[in-house]
Image (cartoon, coloured by chain):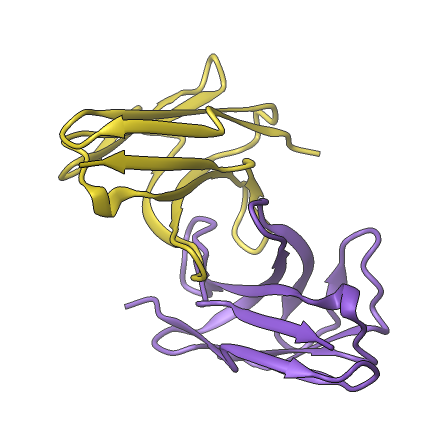
Amino acid sequence: GAVVSQHPSWVICKSGTSVKIECRSLDFQATTMFWYRQFPKQSLMLMATSNEGSKATYEQGVEKDKFLINHASLTLSTLTVTSAHPEDSSFYICSASPTSGAYNEQFFGPGTRLTVL
Amino acid sequence: GENVEQHPSTLSVQEGDSAVIKCTYSDSASNYFPWYKQELGKGPQLIIDIRSNVGEKKDQRIAVTLNKTAKHFSLHITETQPEDSAVYFCASGENSGYALNFGKGTSLLVTP
């Protein structure tokens, strides 16, 4: 149980294009999902908290107009990197917190490797 | 905000030995302490967690201890195996729906 999927697992795009990454909780409902980015040999950096049916809460320094987050259902959140540039190349990981969880359990997806040329 | 410190940053042990990773936190409101294992190119995997009302929890070769007074918690891996080699992250959190605070990670290498 508690499986989270991400799609795609990797993507290469040209500078200036937009890329959408999907995060799905496969066997549980998640009112809250989180988006992280991770640089090589570093820890997870929280980008935003996504709540189903409401606007995402972005961390300081994260441009909300560049990283569009939509959480339209209890099992799906999407992150769209708009007008991507090489500096946006990174490993993007989502996590999902079960709606029924009493504590702050979070289960992570396998990550999406984004390379912007 | 919450600050989670994790030590050591790298740890090398021989197969069969034990490995211990320690974390400290600053927010006394934290009540949930998970540990994640991340293999290269993959997402973090929850391996064990502990709630603030428990001092110790064990799952086969993995155990976690929590000292709320001192605000520190530790991961213990016994009888290490090469497949235990990975980066381990500790985290702390409060209520459901809020983000976890992560340590910087420990790169564990288990040599045969």
Closest to the observer: A24 or A53? A24
Residue B106 visible: yes
Which chain is the one coloured yellow? B
Question: Is residue A37 toward the left or the right of residue A99 in the image?
Answer: right
Residue situated furthest top in the rendering: B70
Q: Residue at x 54, y 77 (%)?
A: A10
- Determine which quarter of the picture holds residue B19: top left
Q: Nearer the viewer, residue A46 or B56?
A: A46
Q: In the figure, what tint was chain A given?
A: purple
**Observer-nearest residue: A70 or A52?**
A70
Write the residue at 54% across / 65% down. A94
Q: Is residue A22 visible?
A: no
What's the residue at 38%, 73% (across, down)?
A: A28
Q: Which quadrant does the N terminus of chain A fall into?
A: bottom left
Q: What residue is shown at x 40% (from left), y 30% (from top)?
A: B52
Q: Position of residue A116 (x, y in %)?
A: 72, 75
